[in-house]
Amino acid sequence: MEIEKVTSLEQYDLDTLIDDSLSEGYKFINRLVDEYKAGSNRFDKKGEALYVAKLDGEVVGIGGLNIDPYLSLPDVGRVRHLYVLQKCRGNRVGKKLLNIIIVEARKHFRTLRLSATDNPVANNLYIKCGFSEVDDVYKASHILEISKADTK
């Protein structure tokens, strides 16, 4: 498996990711593609990045890093649109994507936030990678203080 930093999303076939995510009721991969095409989120501001995981040439996962759009703080990042094909879960694809996002975030941000789904497997992944669950925090279910990040 390889992880690539995306420079142009159009060069990747994301149809399988979109179909797989929609079959689970998740619309955020479709939204990622739409926002990228429209130019509203290209993961191209300072500190931002988008990654794909590929296995035998097939895109099996995706995940991004943005300046948190819900805060007016340039030193707070946000994990966005992390998704792994159902058939590839349990093979550390999500962990590798998340750890690369954390490594990139360390260069630019003091805090990393995200809003997780109610998926207990995803929740467990975030906890294992150093995030803490939070309650009553605007638009965040998990927060990682970058200095505490474990990218092993």
Image (tube, rainbow, N blue to C red):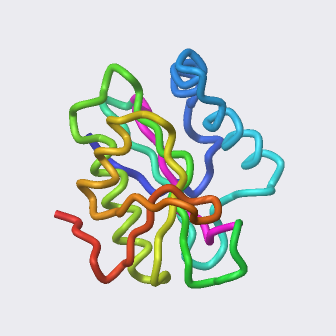
Residue that protrudes farthest toward the right in the picture: 38
The quadrant holding residue 84 is top left
Q: Is residue 56 left or right of residue 8?
A: left
Where is residue 9 shown, x and y percent of the image?
62, 46
Most foreground residue, 12 or 144: 144
Residue that protrudes farthest toward the front in the picture: 136
Question: Vertically, is 6 above or below 138?
Answer: above
Bounds of the magenta segment: 58-69
| Residue sitting at x 50%, y 55% | 141
Most foreground residue, 85 or 112: 112
| Residue sitting at x 37%, y 31% | 57
Residue 64 covered by magenta stretch: yes
Most foreground residue, 121 or 86: 121
Where is residue 12 shown, x and y percent of the image?
55, 37
Q: Is residue 137 left or right of residue 4?
A: right
| Residue sitting at x 65%, y 83% | 73
